[in-house]
Image (cartoon, rainbow, N blue to C red):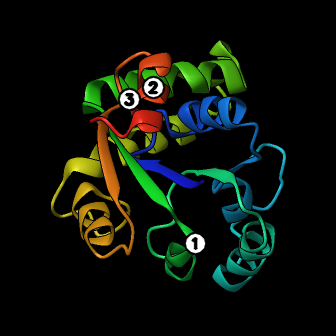
Amino acid sequence: MRLHITGASGSGTTTLGRALAQRLAAPHFDSDDFFWRPTDPPYREKLSAPDRQRLLGELLGERRTWVLSGSLDGWGDQLAALFDLVVWLDVPTEIRVARLAARERVRYGRTAVAPGGAQYGECRAFLAWAASYESPLNEGRSRHRHAAWLAGLPCPVLKLAGNQPTRALVRAVLTGVA
């Protein structure tokens, strides 16, 4: 089974991807690991789209089973032919943004993301970007773009409420029940 788990930032794609990979004894890949160059702090420099496509295509192409989490919208269309199933996690904005804020506090430290902290401005901008997913005016990664991309895929798409427990989501994916 070749699964792609996608959704808005903070919807739980990586968490579900890891859990499914463990359950299937399959390798797990996350699109962020191919979108961004490794930097410290992370998420500062993007890889070019051709480099992302090549690297991810090389890893996925010959494998019979894998789980890929994250978003390919806008750069990974040629990989869609590899998918057996795509899962779209849908989570209310306030839950996603709260999850992301908690993740940023863990990643950078509470002091760094607090007002006056070294990461405060970047954290605020990131959270505002994540909250804009629902806006029809958002020209980047958005619900509208994701829905259009998903509608054109050559495989089944399973939409799930991503605010369920991970165990329930794994069961839903493996049984194909929404």
Q: Is residue 58 visible?
A: yes
Mark 1 or mark 3, earlier in chain: 1
Judge from the rendering whether residue 2 lies leftward or rightward of residue 39; answer left or right.
Answer: left
Whole-number angstrom distance, CA of label 1 to CA of label 2: 22 Å
Q: Quadrant of the C terminus?
A: top left
Residue 127 occupies quadrant: top left
The residue positioned 29% from the left and 50% from the top of the image is 133
The label on residue 97 is 3
Judge from the rendering whether residue 25 lies leftward or rightward of residue 80; answer left or right.
Answer: right
Labels 2 and 3 touching (C-beta < 8 A): no
Q: Quadrant of the N terminus?
A: bottom right
Mark 2 or mark 3, earlier in chain: 3
In the rendered picture of this protein, how many numbered marks are placed on residues?
Answer: 3
Residue to which mark 2 is pinned: 171
Residue 48 occupies quadrant: bottom right
Looking at the image, the residue that sits furthest to the front is: 175
The residue positioned 70% from the left and 18% from the top of the image is 109
Residue to which mark 1 is pinned: 82
Relative to 22, say whether 151 is above or below. Answer: below
Q: Position of residue 79 (x, y in %)?
A: 57, 76
Query: Mark 3 falls on what kind of element?
Result: helix
The residue positioned 49% from the left and 79% from the top of the image is 77
Whole-number angstrom distance, CA of label 1 to CA of label 3: 31 Å
Labels 1 and 2 touching (C-beta < 8 A): no
Relative to 173, say whether 151 is above or below. Answer: below
